[in-house]
Amino acid sequence: MFEWNRVVLVYEDMEFSNAIIPYLTYALENMGIQLSHKTAIPTSAQSSQILEQLEVLMTLQSTVFMVLHMSIDLASRFFAVANEAGLMSKGFAWLVTFVDTMDHVAIDLMEGVIGLRPYVPNTKALKNFRRRYKRFSMMMQTEGHELNLFGLWVSGPWLVRRLASSVERKRNRNSRFLKETNGTWLMGMLNFSYRGISGDFELVNGQIQPSVFEIFNVTRKGQRMIGYWTHDRGISKNLYPNSRHTRRTLEANESIGSKWIIGVPSKNGFKEFVNIQPLDKKVDERKPGFTIEVFKAVWESLGPSPNGYEFRTMDGTYDDLCCKVDAKEIHAAMGDISIVSSRSNCVDFTLPYLESGVAMLIKTRHDGPKDVDILEAIKLGSMAAKFILMQSYTANLSSILTINQLQATIPSVRELGRCHVGYQNLSFVKDYLISHFGFEESMLKPYGSVDDYQEALSKGSENGGVCAIYDEIPYMGIFLAQYTTGYMMVGPTYRTDGLGFALPVGSPLVANFSRAILNFTQGNDMALIKKKYFGVVSIDLDDTGSVSSSGPSLTSGALQAYLSSSQLLSYCRMTVSTVTNPPEMNNVEESHNPNQDNIDESADEATLEVHPFN
């Protein structure tokens, strides 16, 4: 629960404590907790002896101390010396099992201590008993002796005595009782249960069944409950696992108001997630946004609530929003809140309802086919070469026309360090870029909307914009859906834990919400909400390559130019072939010429020169 893996054990040197140390050590080892040191304090130890032992503890690396079953007098002296030695200050953690039995002076020195004690339900019988005890103490002039757990436990033997007396009376009334029951009355004593003023008591085969323990924190105002421990469920915030009961209990105990106050981030951009009206700063109920619709669906799946909830917009960063949950200004926080470790100190997150990751968005350069100048293509000096190369370029021409030539202006790591880089305002990405990539804060620029991204990338870093923008994948999808050409997302993708709801630390509703989210995200309703706000844009988080959106690669202008060139070249080819190889005139008779053979040979040579173009 507290993520402690090393602990120092301090106990009173007596037979009872020494007997349970091996069992405690075994239990801690099974939980992965190392018992780094054990210190036994004598019952009669004075302040100087206690200080010597504490000086040894101060040299250890462990700062978590477990104090086990000390007598009242020794515990009072021990914590007084520990406070003087500075071991009760911030940075040290103490776990004890005897706070209720100590005097007020010692308890005042134990602020911040974690306590463990048997759970005693505050029943009507207990209240009456305390009232009678107080009245009796006033009569006997013993008001200084307050009722504690040990006093409540005294009521147990009285019940055993009454049970034995009842059995004895039955035996006396019927002399054959013992013979007929054959000793089963003894088994009845070893297997019975009762509810006294100190809680439930149960014996099974003569063994006391595990009780319920409560975990609390000592504060200036008294004690603050942290949770409970039971044998079946371990540590939990509430004794009742039913989600509806838990929700009503939390609402009744909270001082914020009758309704659940759900904090949402107040932002102007990316309204697909949270759509805030600019005038009244309230959620637009007509089209509230993806995250709000998911929250409503999850809330309804948990069952009816008597008080309901209301959204309240909050200014500031997402970290500030989570801290308001911890400060009990709001009951929970939702919106496009990323699950990051730094926020887990203030809140507990549910399971993610949307996967995410961080990637880079850049501007691309389109190097596709350009319009052709026909007159430039028909220069007589290069006509023959173009005729020869026409056939060999046919395949290349097809690929050029059908494949769009996009070249991403991807900056290198060194170039990124010299140019400005953008990120979404108020998000965790800024700290991520500084801590993981080593960016200088002065080179980072915040932006709040899709249009801001487009304007910054269009300008470029040299003209007041940026050379790249880092953001989470869902926002990239929204950008590429709006600006379909000229931009692309490039990998690698740095996976994050996704988007989730933020609830108070230790809240039992975290598990209830997580189960509801898991059921909802696997259904059809989730797909419909995604399509409603994000359209058909889909980006695979496992794809570390580039993701781009571009227009058609084969334009009508380019196709017309190439077809015109092809027709003109074919016409020229036919003309040249006709001139160099005229058709024979069958009706004209020519006289024999001595040079006819030479002319025929020349014609043959001319014909051979034209053959490659036939």
Image: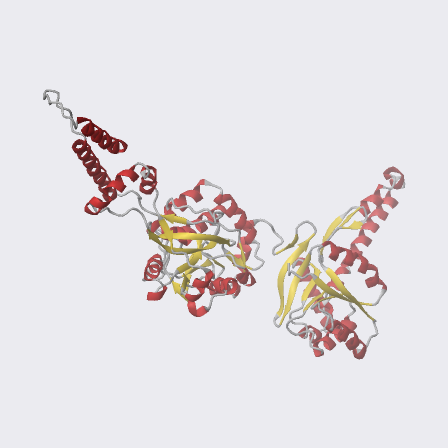
In x, y percent, where is residue 420? 40, 65
Report if residue 382 is visible in the image: yes
Residue 39, image quadrant: bottom right
- Specify the quadrant of the image occupied by residue 601: top left
Name the foreground residue: 250 vs 146.
Answer: 250
Which of the two residues, 513 or 32, is positioned nearer the viewer here?
32
- Front residue of 516/25: it is 25
- Image height check: is 509 above or below 321? above
Q: Where, quadrant-wise, is the C terminus in this rendering?
A: top left
Res. 335 visible in picture: no
At 17% from the left and 31% from the top, the residue drawn is 578
Q: How is the image coloured?
A: secondary structure
> In the image, is 38 to the left or to the right of 603?
right
Point out the residue furthest to the front here.
594
Q: Seen in the image, is 577 located left or right of residue 520?
A: left
**x then y, percent, for residue 594:** 16, 26
Q: Indicate the quadrant containing the N terminus: top left, top right, bottom left or bottom right.
A: bottom right
Identify the residue shown where x is 71% and y is 78%. 85
* Residue 399 x, y percent position in the rendering: 34, 40
Side of 522 where 207 appears, left or right: right
* Marker count (numbered): 0
Where is residue 197 drawn, in percent x and y? 71, 57
